[in-house]
Amino acid sequence: MTVEEVLELIEAKDMTPETDKNTEVSCGYTCDLLSWVMAHGTAGMAWVTVQTHMNVIAVASLMEMAAVIIPEGIEMEAPSLEKAKEEGITVLESPLTAYEICARLAAKGLAGK
């Protein structure tokens, strides 16, 4: 599954249109504790979190994730979006809950971490 396919599946807004949407997503993950994500994250992951600060982008970049997904229409802070663009990290904002996002991804065959 590509980031573009995820974007459509979860009815998301693309907050970083400059980034590559043809990137393959290897798995999905949901967690808001950054240290836990750093310990368990993997390259190509689509990470669902309500966190919107700069450290989210730092972790996603460090782990070479495919995308950060912000649920429930939560808006990511502007400086974080700018950093995401610089780092090439796709940020998607979905109106769905984290549970609904994960359920849709799993139903389409995307494995969890």
Image: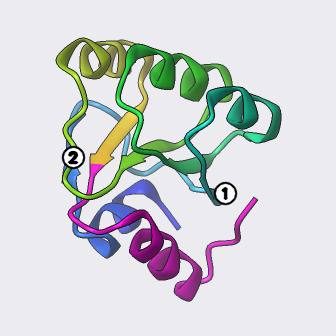
Q: Secondary structure at mark 1?
A: loop
The numbered dot on residue 26 is 1
Which residue does the image show at 54% across and 88% down from the upper left? 107
In the picture as drawn, the residue positioned furthest to the right comes out as 39
- Give the spatial CA distance, label 1 vs label 2: 19 Å
Q: Amino acid at mark 2?
A: Asp
User: Of marks 1 and 2, which one's residue comes earlier in the chain?
Assistant: 2
| Residue found at x 40% / y 15% | 54
- Above-or-below relation of 38 to 108: above
The relative height of residue 112 versus residue 86 in the rendered view (above or below) is below
Q: Is residue 112 depicted above or below 93 in this figure?
A: below
Q: Find disc 2 in the rendering and name its residue.
A: 14
Give the residue furthest to the bottom: 107
Residue type (three-letter) at the residue carrying disc 1: Ser
Q: Is residue 98 found left or right of 61 in the rendered image? A: left
Q: Quadrant of residue 91?
A: top left
Residue 23: image x %, image y %?
50, 48
Q: Quadrant of residue 109?
A: bottom right
Q: How would you rate the neighbour count of disc 1 (Cα within 10 Å): few for under 14, some for 14-19, many for 20 or more?
A: some
Answer with left or right where residue 56 lies relative to residue 79.
right
Magenta residues span: 93-113
Asked if the magenta segment contains residue 102, the reply would be yes
Residue 67: percent from the left, percent from the top?
46, 43
- In terms of depth relative to the viewer, which is nearer, 32 or 82? 32
